[in-house]
Image: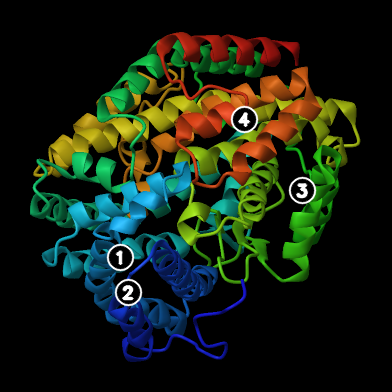
Amino acid sequence: MQRNFIDKNFTITTWENLKPYFDNLLSRELNSVSDLKQLLLNSSELGAVISENMAWRYIKMTCDTSNTDLRNSFNDFVQNIEPHMAPITNQLNIKINNCNYKNELNTSAYNIYFKGIKNSIDLFREENIELNTKLQELEQKFGEISGAQTIEHDEKTLTMQQAGVFLKNLDRNIRESIYNKLQIRRALDEEALNNLYSELIQLRNKVALNCGFKNFRDYKHQALGRFDYTVNDCLNFHNSVQQHAVDLLNDLHKNRKEKLKLETYKPWDTSVDEEGLTPLKPFETANELIEKTIKCFNKIDPYFGQCILTMQKMNRLDLESRIGKAPGGYQYPLYETEVPFIFMNSVGLLRDLTTMVHEGGHAIHSFLYEKQELIDFKSPPSEVAELASMSMELISMEHWDVFFNDKEDLRRAKKQQLESVIDTLPWIATIDKFQHWVYTNPNHTLIERKENWLKIANEFSASVIDYTGLESNLARKWQVQLHLFEVPFYYIEYGFAQLGAIAMWRQYKQNPKQAIENYKNALSLGYTATIPQIYNAAGIKFDFSATYINELMQFLKEEYLKL
């Protein structure tokens, strides 16, 4: 992005050096639609600069959670810049909302934008500024706690991700030993994470009450801008998944138990190859993962491969797991330099390949909507963002021969990928339903939290997995889910997008060229159309009814049985 409003040498250091740009925007007279358009363009440019500055502080902190300087830099933004931005941004929103000329910008894109502006105004409360600052500080503690978790094995210190590799080991004794070490280590932080979550719940509930909502669940639904579906739709999704996806999950694990010839099927048996083969190794190093991903994406569409190549050249990839690095993976859009960043914790397993193509799908999305006029047009809702990434997981699978020369390894990889998809919907429903209970019962006790987690988890779990003697491990299983701590209620979007991704994959198998054209056209829209309109542009439906879920589950089952 070329700077036209912001000085080319300007860098955000303090609120004092940033404030004049906001004052400039607020002081302008809006005497024509062109004045309004210029205000929106300049405001968008300012937003891009601020967003990228914040992004780099976050990226650097998660790449090295042990570095206090990096953590302090991020916290400085959260504590000393963002709180000042909130009220002045609200004033700017009111200025835009009250401008009569906005009615002349009567397009789908601007209608959605103005709806978002009005929503932000409706939810703004001065008393929540301090609470939101505190929340952002607390939310980062999960990464600090998780990033410090390690175990010892064979006289080596392993991150939890690195240790997870051994859960695929053919030696059941090793699997059990590693599983127990992981659980013992996680148990050390159980109380800290419970206390952290309790504190987050109370603060979030207070934010919601300040805005006149009965609970944080209803507040967050509106704050996330979920204009195209309701809370009841989420509840219906839970029920539909329980009806039509859990049986498929049960069948999957029953089959695994039989093939493994086990009398009792334990949690450490759920990842090992059921045919007694060693874990798949699609790559050895991060560089190999990058090169193979580029080749794979080139086979889908040369533009996709070029996107990852550009990121590689600009050092926008940090892929390998290491001690002190935050857990998980993400793609962070960088609106000013217009080339995103991918962060993950690869250890050479199939799941890392899946993570890479998932985040690669997000990155491609960032490149595709880059030409949109305003930063808000480049900020699609998560239901669309996750469609981009989860579709790429399944579409790219058709070209995984790049990663697997052996046909049998390729078959196993596809089978394991579909198994993870079968596992995904019930887990998403579990986490989302748990959050619904948590935030509609904010004053619950830890005992009630445990009881309700177990009740909900059992509704969506494979009953064949035997947790006898391991009940405490299951009771804290929710604590591995980053979203609960850092981005509350941002999870059901994965469920809706997973359904969309299955539909996109079905379309790709029927007509690859048309499917990719639809995929690119839909994602290029950014957030200039509604979610149903974007899904329609992709050639699929935004539908999470029991009938539709059943239809897609049957297709998934058929494809799985072919392998």
Where in the figure is residue 431, as x and y percent of width and height?
Answer: 35, 35
Contact flag, marks 1 and 3 (Cβ < 8 Å): no
Contact? badges 3 and 4 (CB < 8 Å): no
Q: Is residue 332 above or below residue 230?
A: below
Measure how far apart labels 1 and 3 are at the Cα level: 34 Å
Which is in the foreground here, disc 4 or disc 1? 4
Q: What residue sits right under mark 1 in the picture?
A: 136
Tag nearer the camera, 3 or 2: 3
Q: CA distance from mark 3 to mark 4?
A: 17 Å
Q: Which residue is mark 3?
A: 304
Badge 4 crowding class, 10 Å Cα cut-off, few under 14, some 14 to 19, many 20 or more, is: many
- Label 3 sits on a secondary structure element that is helix
Q: Residue at x 49, y 68 (%)?
A: 62
Q: Which callout, 3 or 4, points to the residue nearer the camera? A: 4
Marked residue nearer the N-terminal end (1 or 3) = 1
Earlier in the chain: of badge 3 and badge 2, it is 2
Q: Position of residue 177 (x, y in %)?
A: 53, 43
Secondary structure of residue under mark 2: helix
* Residue type for callout 3: Phe
Q: For the residues labelled 1 and 2, say whether their Cβ atoms are less than 8 Å apart.
A: yes
Q: Nearer the viewer, mark 2 or mark 4?
A: 4
Give the distance between the C-alpha atoms of the residues marked 3 and 2, in whole angstroms. Answer: 34 Å
Label whose residue precedes the other's in the sequence (2 or 4): 2
The answer to whether mark 3 and mark 2 are in CB contact below 8 A is no
Say which amino acid is labelled 2. Answer: Val
Q: Is residue 372 left or right of residue 289?
A: left
